[in-house]
Image (tube, rainbow, N blue to C red):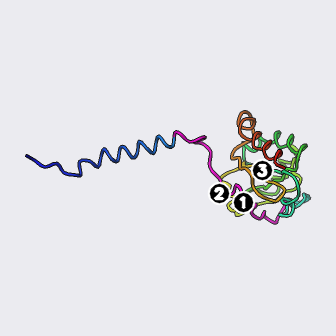
């Protein structure tokens, strides 16, 4: 009688392992959500440059009492333009700080002049080094920060429609309730 090689068992075992990984991935809460290593940590330093005529965003502002938002944006970013009215409305309720990412001063100022400036203070990040420290993958990204300067939530993408009402607003309300 011929003996069966143990190597014959490798393909079914590999298939079973791959199937298990797929099943685990499908069971996650939101497979599109990119987890942030920054949630629960102190906000990293913000860049120490700003747009001409604008208030400089400082690390101390992020540690002032109350919930606040930090939004990474750019004038060349279409989703940033789409979320701009939402940021304008939010700025009537709480401090919204902006970090202009990889942009020219002229283009950023033209955008804010044309569409309005919802930001209480602004930092500029022309080379994107500050964004790396914050874990930003691409604009727009918005962070909810508490009164101690700790990041409570990171939202990647524009604050519009169902994503805004179903994902972002519940986290903002939770942060306000804990305040």
Q: CA distance from mark 2 to mark 3?
A: 14 Å
Whether 38 is among the magenta residues is yes
Q: Earlier in the sequence, mark 3 or mark 1?
A: 1
Q: Nearer the viewer, residue 33 or 109?
A: 33
Is residue 114 at least partly visible in the picture? Answer: no
Please report the bounds of the magenta region as a residue range.
Answer: 26-50
Q: Earlier in the sequence, mark 2 or mark 3?
A: 2
Whether residue 135 is situated above or below residue 88 in the rendered picture: below
Residue bearing mark 2: 37
| Relative to 40, 122 lies left or right | right
Q: Image quadrant of residue 128? A: bottom right
- Secondary element under disc 2, as helix, strand or loop, is loop
Residue bearing mark 3: 144
- Secondary element under disc 1, as helix, strand or loop, is loop
Q: Position of residue 109 (x, y in %)?
A: 85, 52
Q: Image quadrant of residue 174? A: top right
Can you name the residue that lies furthest to the top here?
Answer: 162
Q: Are marks 2 and 1 in contact (CB under 8 Å)?
A: yes
Residue bearing mark 1: 41
Q: CA distance from mark 3 to mark 1?
A: 12 Å
């Amino acid at each position: 009688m011929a003996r069966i090689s143990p190597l014959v068992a490798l393909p079914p075992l590999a298939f079973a392992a791959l199937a298990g990984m797929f099943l685990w991935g499908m069971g996650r809460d939101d497979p599109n959500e990119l987890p942030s290593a920054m949630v629960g940590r102190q906000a990293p330093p913000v860049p120490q440059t700003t747009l001409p005529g604008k208030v400089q965003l400082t690390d101390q502002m992020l540690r002032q009492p109350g919930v606040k938002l930090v939004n990474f944006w750019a004038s060349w970013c279409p989703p940033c333009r789409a979320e701009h009215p939402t940021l304008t409305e939010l700025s009537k309720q709480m401090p919204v700080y902006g970090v202009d990412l990889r942009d020219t001063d002229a283009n950023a100022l033209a955008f804010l002049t044309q569409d309005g400036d919802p930001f209480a203070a602004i930092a500029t990040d022309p080379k994107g080094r500050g964004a790396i420290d914050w874990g930003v993958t691409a604009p727009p990204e918005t962070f909810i920060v508490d009164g101690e300067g700790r990041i409570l939530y990171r939202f990647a993408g524009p604050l519009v429609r169902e994503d805004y009402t179903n994902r972002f607003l519940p986290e903002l309300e939770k942060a306000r309730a804990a305040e």
